[in-house]
Amino acid sequence: MVKLVIKPEKGFGKIEVEIGGELWSKIERLSERYGVPPERIIEIAISEEFKEPQGNLEKLEREVKELEEKVWKLEREYAPLKFKAYGVSEDNKLLAIALLGLIAENSQLRRFSGMKPNVNRDLRRLISYYLQG
Amino acid sequence: MSLKIILPKEEFKRIRERDLSALLMENLPKVEETLMAEREQFLAEKIERLQEKLEDMEEKLEELREFYENALKDREIMIKERERLRNENDELRRKIEEKRKKLGEVHES
């Protein structure tokens, strides 16, 4: 037997009811099945404000499961790819630093040799992109 | 074991005189339907959130793939360019050195 005490939000008085074993086991079963506390089940029953299901619970459960699997699959792909991309990007940063030195040296050597400097704009753009990042 | 429930005053008045055990027993099937409807609503909202997340993940993954592919290409370009510059600089240094030697020889003679 479970004792149920109901009180008003404001004012005095209370209702006390003993909930019998059969009724209580039905309430507990619903509570476990839908993951809600027994108090909520009693509140809905008392309020008599009911909703009607559309009957597509299984379909929705299946859809949630499928979507969760898809998201999980993408997340599993994303993490290692991000790690790899970070590695390549760091390599490129080091390469950009090395290239800066080589380009400076090249300009100087060309000047000594009486040659025009060789300006590769695309390469310079690449270098500054990786040095900024 | 005891349960405590607080109800709005009007609700409390309404059920005061009723046989609560009978009311609960009678209404349990409809409570189950209500819980089912609430679960459906919860799942429908979850599906909406998951679809948004999925689209977002697909977009992010596509961007990352593109970034990775570009970074690989850029690495190849920079490695080639590093080799080219190293060779050219070595060559230029060698020629300058040769010139210097020749100038030195002319100076000595």
Image (cartoon, rainbow, N blue to C red):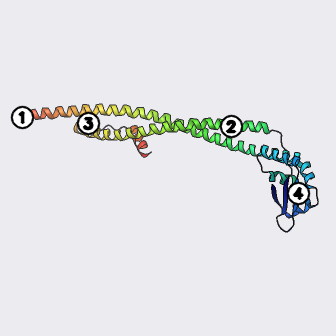
Residue type at mark 1 is Glu
The residue furthest left is: B109
Residue under numbered circle 1 = B108
- Residues under labels 3 and 1: Cα distance? 27 Å
> How many residues crowd around disc 3 within 10 Å: few (fewer than 14), some, or many (20 or more)?
few
SS for tag 1? helix
N-terminal of the pair, mark 4 or mark 2, is 4
Residue A106 in the image: state x and y as whole percent: 29, 37
SS for tag 4? strand
Nearer to us of marks 3 and 1 is 1
Residue A130 in the image: state x and y as whole percent: 42, 42
Residue under numbered circle 2 = A67
Residue type at mark 3 is Met
N-terminal of the pair, mark 2 or mark 3, is 2
Query: Do marks 4 and 2 share a chain?
Result: yes
Residue under numbered circle 4 = A17
Give whichever of A9, A97 is nearer the camera.
A9
Residue under numbered circle 3 = A115
Query: Do marks 4 and 3 share a chain?
Result: yes
Give whichever of B41, B7 is nearer the camera.
B7
- Residues under labels 4 and 3: Cα distance? 103 Å
Residue B94 is labelled as none
Nearer to us of marks 2 and 3 is 2
Give whichever of B57, B67 is nearer the camera.
B57
- Residues under labels 4 and 2: Cα distance? 45 Å
